[in-house]
Amino acid sequence: MLYKFLRLVTFVLVMALGLVACSNSYSSFADVSEENSSSETFSSSSFVVSSSSSIKFSSFSDASETVSVVALVTDTFEVFAFGSLNIDIVADSFLTKFDYGDVVSVMVPGYDTLDVPVVASYGDVFPGEFFLYVSSGLNYLKLEARYGQMAEVIGLGRGAEFPIEVAIRMKEKGGYAEHLGNLNSLAISYSIEAYPELSIADFANFRMVRTTGMGEGRLYRSSSPVDPSIGRNKYADSLAAVAGVKTFVNLANSAEYAESYNGFAQSYYATRNVVYLDVLPGFANTPFKEGFVKGLRYMIEHDSPYLWHCTYGMDRTGFSIAVLEALMGATAEEIKADYVATHRNFYSVSGGRQVALTAKQAELIQAIIVRLMRNAYKVEGVDISDFENADLAAATEKYLLSLGLEQAEIDSLRARLK
């Protein structure tokens, strides 16, 4: 909560200063390239950018029709305070050529190229995802990682020289539009009465991980067994007791915060081994990666059965379990199926009663874990772009080694889970 409050205060201050500074800063027009061939064709008066530096335009050698623009990332407080990259393009001008739901390639020379959706709200993407935030009325765009630091993701350090030229190119027109529609259709209830078709275990999002290579009764996942905020904790705690869970990995809380929950002292949870990681779902950033490694080492040092959870057991838990499944030899289909099972347990509630996800909704949700893993692994130099055909076990071993685990630790982890 403190992080969110500080970010809000900082954003208000930055906006207030920006309103003063921008009155004379955004006066010149950059061009937009609409390519119908490999040659460059620029139409003027399409994008408003900062006049403080000259703009050099890059051509994209693509025979198909596309739209692209080159602008600048400037050095602002937010770059290193929160990792946001402010791009000097007036949002309303940008929206004359691009639409919400488009997928664009953002190219930062010398750093990275990312394919991200164009969205109007942080809630238009799932936690951990990368996106281009375009808000009508603002004099800039923001390249962001939800709950993460984009500057770190692309390797932008404090020694960087600003301004940095950035190219934005259409990747897939409307490529994220279905995802936006799906997100807007999903709703959750905290009342068990809204889920008459679910078992108690499914309502608590509690289940054993049964993918290929995983031992029987070794690894479980659930919503929080102690946090009462979504009305599932007592169910998850009692199910963990029945399963004989010995070791909990809490991604969501510090020890002090968890112990402050009403009923914590009387819970089964309070009698077991627990490691408190207290991380946000910025999967490609240092805080999450360090917390994740800490959780894995705690598993190695303590006995199974293990249970990983956050609040819902959906985002942080979903990513963590997917990595462990991949390490143990799960197929791409198994990983996606287990990830979407959580969303089937929560969504979608309409008129006070759960309505089953459609096949299309499930497909769109499965795509989320693929994007999250691809992005996180890519930051560590591990390519799983062909997710369906990649050797996910070998790739995950490389990923964990890059995070700092030793080979002996990975071998021990496998031995405890198989």
Image: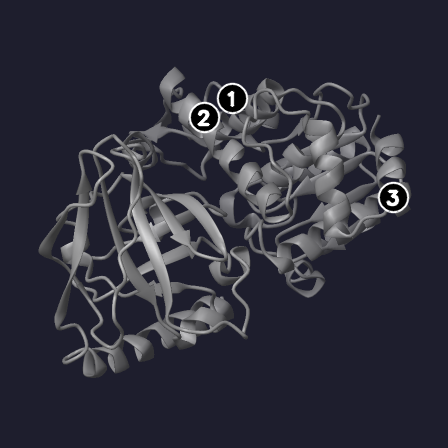
Whether the residues at callouts 1 and 3 have beta carbons within 8 Å, the answer is no
Q: Residue at x 57, y 38 (%)?
A: 373
Residue 364 at x, y percent in the picture: 40, 27
Q: Earlier in the sequence, mark 2 or mark 3?
A: 2
- Dot 2 corresponds to which residue? 195
Q: Earlier in the sequence, mark 1 or mark 3?
A: 1
Whether the residues at callouts 2 and 3 have beta carbons within 8 Å, the answer is no
In this view of the protein, can residue 302 be seen by the observer? no
Reply above or below: 252 against 247: below
Q: Residue at x 40, y 16 (%)?
A: 359
Image color mode: one colour
Residue 76 at x, y percent in the picture: 38, 75
Query: In 3D space, how far apart are the residues under numbered discs 2 and 3 (Cα atoms)?
Result: 41 Å
Residue type highlighted by circle 2? Tyr
Mark 1: which secondary structure?
loop
- Mark 2, residues whose alpha carbon is within 10 Å: few (<14), some, or many (≥20)? many
Residue 168 left/right relative to 372: left
Residue type highlighted by circle 1? Leu
In this view of the protein, can residue 210 be seen by the observer? yes
Reply above or below: 409 against 259: above
Q: Which mark is residue 409?
A: 3
Q: Give residue 408's quadrant in the image.
A: top right
